[in-house]
Image (spheres, rainbow, N blue to C red):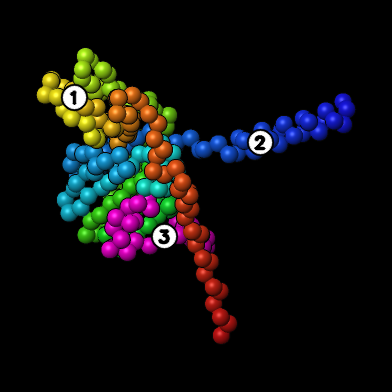
Amino acid sequence: MSALRQLLLLLVVLLGGGTAHAQPTAPAWSGVDLSIVEGLHVPRPDGYTSGITADFKGGLVRVFVGPSELAASWWVVRMTQVVEKQKPTAVPFPAAAEPQAEPVAADPAAPPTPPALLDSADELWASGDRLVIVRLGNVGIMVEVSSGARDKAEAVAAALLPAPGVPLAPPELRKVGTEWRLDVPLSEPPLQVRYEGGQLSGSPGLTFSMPPTAAVVYDHQGRMSRQDFDPMGLVIEVPPPWKDHVLGERPPAVPASPPEPK
């Protein structure tokens, strides 16, 4: 093999490796089953950039199932700004625990201790135990309550559904005569839908005399799918609000200083 051919093959390998490294990380979670979280009311859609909200006694849970880690990271920053008065601060990774001299044997009859998912979260903000904002991959979770925010956030994180899941189809806008009809994919339970702009015509269903500028559908697992339309009701691509966001990273724990010699 000639030296030139070897050089070309090396360049292909290097460029190929660089391209693969630049690809976005696939979503780790497809949704969240809030029905298994104790005490939560039926969730409601809170907007495409806010996610879904479920109330419980004394507080609320907000979940954002994003299409990517970048989207969820952007959402975390947005939530810290929404609750700015509570002064949430970034929580670093926990410091490594010191090994015990004599580890205590676990009770074989006791149920296994669930892992503390927030300890390994990609981003974590808190204000005491009243507010927790956390990102786990492509999902953001926020809990506001008088006390016990971390425990509730752990319970919601334990209800995440691993990917891959069936993608949620976007709504479609069809021209019917002189009107536009918004068709929502069939689902059980039915999808919830929101639209922006437009003018309803008074005909049955979501029928418009002027087309909406956007429509969003939500399912019971917190997933969302948005579609934007031009003034003629044709599909257009609009950059998401997180397009220029820089992915956040959780700060490492500062190692404890060794005690001063006496």
Report the disc number at residue 91: 3
Q: Label 2: few (<14), some or many (≥20) within 10 Å?
A: few
Is residue 139 visible in the rendered image? The answer is yes
Q: Main secondary structure of the magenta part?
A: loop
User: What residue range appears in magenta?
Assistant: 76-105
Q: Residue at x 28, y 32 (%)?
A: 213
- Mark 2 touches mark 1? (CB < 8 Å): no
Q: Which residue ends up furthest to the bottom in the rendered image? A: 262
Image coordinates for residue 148, horizontal then vertical, percent: 26, 56
Report the residue at 48% width, 48% height from top: 247
Q: Residue at x 21, y 17 (%)?
A: 178
Say whether residue 167 is left or right of residue 13. Answer: left
Residue 212: in magenta span: no
Which x, y percent locates residue 103?
48, 57
Which disc, if any, is residue 209? 1
- Sequence-first disc among 2 and 1: 2
Q: Which residue is mark 2?
A: 17
Quarter-wise, where is residue 54 in the image? top left
